[in-house]
Image (cartoon, rainbow, N blue to C red):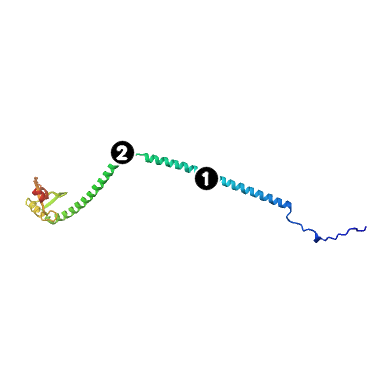
Amino acid sequence: MIKTTINLYSADLLPAKLRLSFQRMMMMVAGLLVISFVSWMLGYWLVSNVETDRAKVSTEKQQLDTQKQQLELQVSARVPEPDLVARVELEQQRLELKKLLSTEINQRDNVISRGYSSLLTDLASVSDGSVWLSHIAVNEQRFEFEGFGSKPQSIPKWVEALKHTETLKGYAFSTMTMNRGESQPLAFKLSSTPEVEAKQ
């Protein structure tokens, strides 16, 4: 059989095959649309949740503001009870008086402590063994002594020596009682006051 047609076109003259066909392009466009739709739905859902939370927080804030205003009105309208105010003021006055009393007691304790210390020192300096004390009392500027003497003349001698001590200098012994029981030493009780008071 004899060939009657001759192909004058080579393979190079044929159009190049395109990798991106219409079908592939439509599939890509569809994929982009699906991705965009999913992204939009996700964003819408997130925004909706945020808006819901914001609305909830706003509602709670309004409720708290209303409650705060009500409480402020209650506080401003509340008047302290006169009885309680009077009791508080009374307790404050008592507390102040107790503080003052405590301060005064501490000061007096210090004075009395110093007074006893110097008094005992002076009593020891005039002690000669013939007089011994059984009771000593210090009340403000008054001194009281109770004790015993071995001889009647030893007590006045001891009293005279007391007048020259530093603690009892300027004091007058206004009251002195003596008593002697059977077969017992001579008991005495002596009270002293400042000479200014004694003269009055």
Say which label, 1 or 2, has the lower sequence index: 1
- Amino acid type at circle 1 is Arg
Image-based side of 93 in relation to 190, left or right: right
Q: Quadrant of the N terminus?
A: bottom right
Residue 54 shows in the view: yes
Residue 185 shows in the view: no
Instruction: Answer few, some or many: residues within 10 Å of disc 1's Cα (few below 14, many 20 plus, some between 14 and 19).
Output: few
From this view, report whether residue 181 is shown above or below residue 128: above
Residue annotated with mark 1:
54
Q: Which of these two is toward me, 178 or 78? A: 78
Task: Name which residue lies at 70% across and 50% down.
Answer: 27
Callout 1: SS: helix
Callout 2: SS: helix
- Amino acid type at circle 2 is Pro
- Please state which of the two labelled residues, at mark 1 or mark 2, is closer to the viewer: 1
Q: Which of these two is toward me, 147 or 28? A: 28
Residue annotated with mark 2:
82
Give how far across and how far down residue 157 sits, in percent: 8, 53
Instruction: Answer few, some or many: residues within 10 Å of disc 2's Cα (few below 14, many 20 plus, some between 14 and 19).
Output: few
**Residue ranking furthest to the left:** 153
Image-based side of 26 in relation to 110, left or right: right
Task: Name which residue lies at 39% across and 39% down.
Answer: 74
